[in-house]
Image (spheres, rainbow, N blue to C red):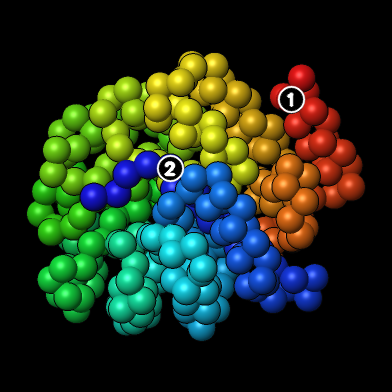
Amino acid sequence: MIEGTLPALLTPFTAAGEVDLHALDLHLDWLHERGIRTVSPLGTTGEGPSLSLEERKAVIERVARHRSGMAFVPGTGCTALPETVELSAFALDLGAQAVLVAPPTFFPPTEDGVLRYYATLLAALPDSAAVLLYHIPQNTRIPITDRMLRELPVAGVKDSSSDPEHLLPWVREFGERLDIVDGSDDLVAAHHAAGGRATITLLANVVPEELDGIRAGDDAERRQRRLSALREAVSAVPRHAAVKYVLHLLTGLPASGVRPPLDDLTAAQRVDVQQRLSELEE
């Protein structure tokens, strides 16, 4: 069972554009000091699809061997099914609590085709393997359907649709037997109020205490307003780059850019992020 606040872990890069494993260590240290015990690297926030298979393995291994002993739920979905099997098996061999697998992109498959993709993956992994499906149709253009949750022997699903009318019915229908994980910072309070047990979100990278406070019911309404305002602020500019910049501003951790095709912030956008962050802290 997956519970609590899981940062959708950022992937830091050096100035030369290489994965910065040392900066990753520092971010994990910072999160662990603030009570985070499980992270989810290499998803959408972690720019997983922009990393090579070997880079993704290097990140998984670094997280698995981090001095904190933190649990991890890495994104392992690839367009090529053999690579998804290879990366998922690699992560599970290193002790991953579960793997998070988005449906394959590029080809527009049928629902039956996606079911066969996941069924083949599950058959190739140990029976004990926990696989979370990843519903993020705004990126993949392929939804995870109710039928998939009913027919596949999966551990659960992460819903990053940002649609409460989609997420909350899943919590009610499947929440007793599956991990229904919220992937939207805007829905944290609603998700926990409905009985949801876990979140994997962008802003847990920088304000994990806000998400933990909402989960605990500690001034949840005010915390949710602050979280949603911060989400709006970083979404007004290139979002991945903005969250990396906010992390640098709030923690002093090394600054990091993003990998193309994502855009870094312009000088004017950095000023805008600083201004919005200052207003939130007032």
Residue positioned 65% across, 51% down in the render: 240
Q: In what element is the residue under mark 2? A: strand
Q: Residue tagged by mark 1?
A: 281
Residue 161 lies in quadrant: top left
Q: Relative to 110, is 72 on the left or the right?
A: right
Query: Which residue is more in the foreground, 39 or 242?
Result: 39
Residue 109 x %, y %: 29, 62
The quarter of the rendered structure image containing the C terminus is: top right
| Residue occupying the far left of the picture | 151
Q: Is residue 45 visible?
A: no
Given the image, on which type of amino acid does mark 1 rest?
Glu
Q: Is residue 201 visible?
A: yes
Residue 46 x %, y %: 55, 59
Q: From the viewer's perspective, is residue 61 above or below residue 261?
A: below
Residue positioned 51% across, 23% down in the render: 224
Q: Relative to 119, is 87 on the left or the right?
A: right
Q: From the viewer's perspective, is residue 102 above or below residue 226?
A: below
Given the image, on which type of amino acid does mark 2 rest?
Thr
Precedes in sequence: disc 2 or disc 1? 2
Q: In what element is the residue under mark 1? A: helix
Residue positioned 39% across, 60% down in the render: 71
Residue 164 x %, y %: 36, 27
Residue 190 lies in quadrant: top left
Q: Relative to 265, is 154 on the left or the right?
A: left
Query: Which residue is more in the foreground, 106 or 133?
Result: 133
Is disc 1 surrounded by few (<14), some (14 to 19) or many (20+) residues within 10 Å?
Answer: few
Q: Relative to 223, is 188 on the left or the right?
A: left
Residue 188 x %, y %: 43, 30
Is disc 2 surrounded by few (<14), some (14 to 19) or many (20+) residues within 10 Å?
Answer: many
Q: Residue tagged by mark 2?
A: 5
